[in-house]
Amino acid sequence: MAGQDLSAHVALVTGASRGIGAAVALMLAELGAAVSVNYRARADDADAVVARIKAKGGRAIAVAADVSQSAAVAGMVERIARELGPIDILVNNAGIAIVRGVDELSESDFDRTLLVNLKSAFLCTQAVLPGMRVRKWGRIVNITSGAARGAGAIGQHYNASKAGMEGLTRGYAARLVKEGITVNNVAPSLIETDMMKGRTDLARNIPLGRMGQPEEVAQAVAMVLGNEYMTGQTIILNGGMAFI
Ligand code: NAP
């Protein structure tokens, strides 16, 4: 994103130790933002993302927190404010994909998916919003999925969690539009990450002929950040699989 300057901003990217989140964190740092690299368990991976940012002269910290837990989210946001400054860019990216057939989906699979994919976005948004409202500037990007609107490859619980995120986005966008805060979705499908390991056969469904790359999702996130007029929308990346 040539010309975009985020050096006055502090970003939190949830689930940034790997995959799409890591690519987003690296992209935001490249554009000058100070970046908090959240993760749940893989400290070494998160530290490696931070090291890559620092090697290029950027500012970053790794922050462990299970974003489905409100106390952990509150602690994380406080620590980031202390060490980097108040968060004004939030990318709700952390997610899980428990592949299940219709009959084998358990209640605990359903609950866990809704907690990690949907409730986490609510908790993180609520935690950063008061500061954004005071400063009258904020950017929130939710990483949803083609599964919010299409069949998807994971299961109905995952579809529900991502469709729920789209609703959350529109609800917040409508209520915050006069306060300098935009809320949008970036909805990828079939991106080559650990989440899609062993599922490269699905590439045959993609008209472009290959899976997407995490960096391509990061580009879409960066695009959204520079635009105050766009809010409550969904940017879709799917290699031509559907036009919606
Ligand atoms: P991934 O490679 O599996 O990485 C998941 C990331 O989320 C990791 O950093 C992981 O942390 C973190 N995470 C998981 N549960 C967490 C929790 N409770 N609290 C904090 N962090 C947590 O996944 P990905 O493919 O990059 O997916 C990123 C997002 O894009 C997800 O929301 C996913 O649903 C969405 N998406 C992906 C695709 C795709 O094709 N890959 C398509 C559409 C949408 P640890 O490393 O510490 O475990």
Image (tube, rainbow, N blue to C red):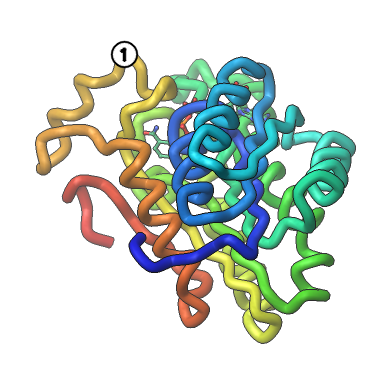
Along the viewing direction, whichever of 166 and 197 lies nearer the viewer: 197
Left or right: 90, with 202 as reference point = right
Along the viewing direction, whichever of 74 and 50 lies nearer the viewer: 50
Along the viewing direction, whichever of 202 and 183 lies nearer the viewer: 183
The residue to which callout 1 is attached is 198
Residue 118 percent across, percent down from the top left: 64, 44
Q: How many marks?
A: 1
Which quadrant is home to the N terminus? bottom left
Residue 142 percent across, percent down from the top left: 54, 53
Is label 1 in a helix, a strand or a loop? loop
Left or right: 95, with 214 as reference point = right
Which quadrant is home to the C terminus? bottom left
Amino acid type shown at disc 1: Gly
Residue 123 percent across, percent down from the top left: 77, 48
Instruction: Answer few, some or many: residues within 10 Å of disc 1's Cα (few below 14, many 20 plus, some between 14 and 19).
Output: few
Q: Is residue 228 above or below residue 158?
A: below
> What residue appears at the point 35 percent right and 30 percent down from the top-left corner?
153
Along the viewing direction, whichever of 29 and 196 lies nearer the viewer: 29
Residue 160 appears in the rendering: no
Q: Is residue 146 above or below residue 47?
A: below
> What residue appears at the point 89 percent right and 37 percent down from the top-left corner?
71
Q: Is residue 24 above or below residue 199?
A: below
Splitting the image into 4 quarters, where does residue 3 fall? Answer: bottom left
